[in-house]
Every structure is written in C-alpha cells, then in structure tokens.
Image (cartoon, rainbow, N blue to C red):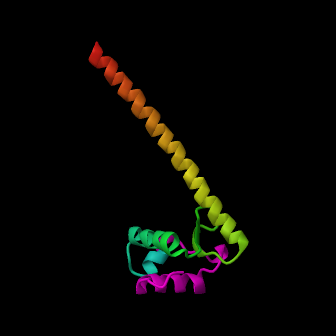
Amino acid sequence: MQNNLTYEEIDIVEYLKNYCDGIEHAISNEGLAHKFSIDIRTMRNLITNLITNHHVPIGSCSKKHSGIFYCITDKDYEIASRELLSRIKNLSKRHKGLRLGYFKESKQLQLMEVI
C-alpha cells in the first residue's frame, strides 16, 4: 500500500481490516458509506481508488455475502476476482449490444437517406 493515502482512505482501510476482514464480515456499500457519513457514489470512488491506485486488497461480492470486505484468504481473493471477471464479461456483452444496435440503426438511417 502506498503512503499517500488521505486520512479518510486510511480510516476506511483500517475499518475494513478490523471489522470487515474476509467475506464472512462483508459490509454493504450503503452501510460503509453511512459509517463514514459520505454518499454511496463517493464511497465507491474511494474504494475503486484504494484498489486501483493503492493496491489495497478490497473485494466485493453481490451474491451470498453481499458487500465489501478486506481480502485475507485465498478464498476471499478468488471470490472477489470472480466477481470482477463476471462484471467485465457482462460489460463486454453490453458493449457488443451497443455496437450492434448503433451500426444497425446507422445503416437503416443511411438507407432512408438514399430513398
């Protein structure tokens, strides 16, 4: 973990380490945001920054134990990793649908302009 965390980020990491260690102790986004008196979008952005830029092993899962947790075991890591890969796969499908729909619509508009 890098040293240039904000005080708020340090507090969040310490909270997750002490109270949300492992998927069995996951906390919802809403619960964590409420704990720190910030809105959910800001909390999501802080968590994303902690993972992406500071390499803090924070996982999330939207299935059995819904919420955010500090990864402490291989099982935690595997669950968090599968969750991210599933989201990537679904976003890829969404992108494909957008692309196909756009170009289908675009070709229909071109045909209408010719007629």
Please count the marks in the image.
0
In percent of width and height, residue 47 lies at 48, 72
Please name the predominant secondary structure of the magenta segment in the image. helix
Q: Is residue 48 magenta?
A: no
Q: Is residue 24 magenta?
A: yes
Is 53 displayed left or right of 86 in the figure?
left
In percent of width and height, residue 89 lies at 58, 49
* Rendered position, 79 above or below 27: above
* Magenta residues (range): 1-30
Task: Identify which residue, 74 or 52, lies in the foreground.
Answer: 52
In percent of width and height, residue 23 lies at 65, 73
Which quadrant is the C terminus positioned in? top left
The residue lying at 42 percent from left, 69 percent from top is: 45
In percent of width and height, residue 103 lies at 41, 30
Task: Identify which residue, 51 or 64, lies in the foreground.
Answer: 51
Is 2 displayed left or right of 109 in the figure?
right
* Rendered position, 107 above or below 78: above
Which quadrant holds residue 111? top left
Which quadrant is the N terminus positioned in? bottom right
* Identity of the residue furthest to the right in this view: 74
The residue lying at 63 percent from left, 80 percent from top is: 21
* Rendered position, 91 above or below 78: above
* Identity of the residue furthest to the top in this view: 115
The residue lying at 48 percent from left, 43 percent from top is: 95
Is 104 displayed left or right of 26 in the figure?
left
